[in-house]
Image (cartoon, grey):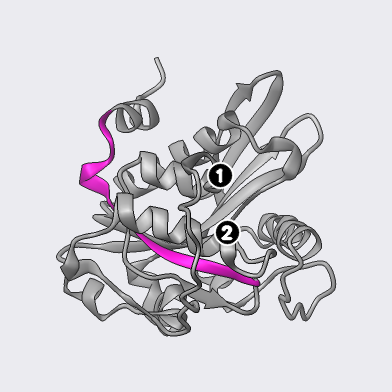
Amino acid sequence: MTAQTARTQPRRGRNLKISLTRSPDQIEAAQRLRYRVFSEEYGSDLGATVPGLDADAYDTVCDHLIVTDEDTGEPVATTRILHQQNAAAIGGFYSAGEFDLAALGQLPGTMAELGRTCVHPDYRNGGTITLLWAAIAEYLTERQVDYLIGCASISMADGGGRAWRIAQHLQQQYLSAPECRVTPLRPLPHLTHPETHKAEDIPALIRAYMRLGAKVCGEPCWDPEFRCADVLVLLEVSNLAGRYSRHFLRKPA
């Protein structure tokens, strides 16, 4: 999938199209969706300079994947990808503002970062997320990316208990190798909770990461702007979980 190209695929009665773009108009539509989800729904303090838009300097150097409902013309899911070769233009990866990434700098090969991923509440189903991840996998393969990183967010709306328990579960089940561990710049307080959160309560986007073979790189970071806890995830592209890899990367007949 190259810039400004799109793929259409019906999902459970909906006609969804996914596009890879750097078009300012399409990016603005994605920014409006992000504002609706992050600010209006989750209560994040985005410090928006333009009312109704979640925009920052990273948008100008990222490639944007946008899922659109062709029946309404509205964007329903989006994510952005910052390729390593473009990161220097913005001073590094976004996640470097939350974690000390020194350990990951030792990894051989090319890295990219996934960020600002969100889905409209009416489209939070397996079909939409699968379509989005299919395009991500295609992007990574075409651009010969070896590692994908990203900040996966967990709501702190309850004061942090749920985020702490989910983070503990992720570290117990999906912890990266020691040489890939990162240090949060704003660690969460170590609250005491008697039970680990159930796996089915893990946010859908984080579940998708784990099913693809991703690992969490240590303790979470507190993100005051988004009022959430972020865990840094690392996906080695060559180790994509087999059945998901075959599904996402299959070519149309």
Is 88 situated left or right of 127 in this image? left
User: Is there a contact, CB below 8 Å, between mark 1 and mark 2?
Assistant: yes
Of residues 99 and 19, which is closer to you in this image? 99
Q: Nearer the viewer, residue 84 or 119?
A: 119
CA gap between label 1 and label 2 equals 9 Å
Mark 1, residue position: 201
Residue 110: which quarter of the image? bottom left
Residue 7 spot, x, y in % from top left: 54, 32
Q: Residues within 10 Å of mark 1 (few under 14, many from 20)?
A: few
Disc 2, SS: helix
Q: Position of residue 205 (x, y in %)?
A: 52, 47
Task: Tell me the kind of residue under disc 2.
Answer: Arg
Label 1 sits on a secondary structure element that is: helix
Q: Which residue is mark 2?
A: 162
Q: Residue furthest front?
A: 194
Q: Which residues are magenta?
A: 227-242
Q: Position of residue 125 (x, y in %)?
A: 62, 33
Pick whichever, 249 or 195, lies toward us. Answer: 195
The structure residue drawn at horizontal position 31% and vertical position 26%, both measured from the top left corner, is 243
Give the side of residue 12 with respect to residue 79, left or right. Answer: right
Q: Residue furthest right?
A: 51
Question: Local crowd at mark 2 within 10 Å, few (<14), some, or many (≥20)?
Answer: many
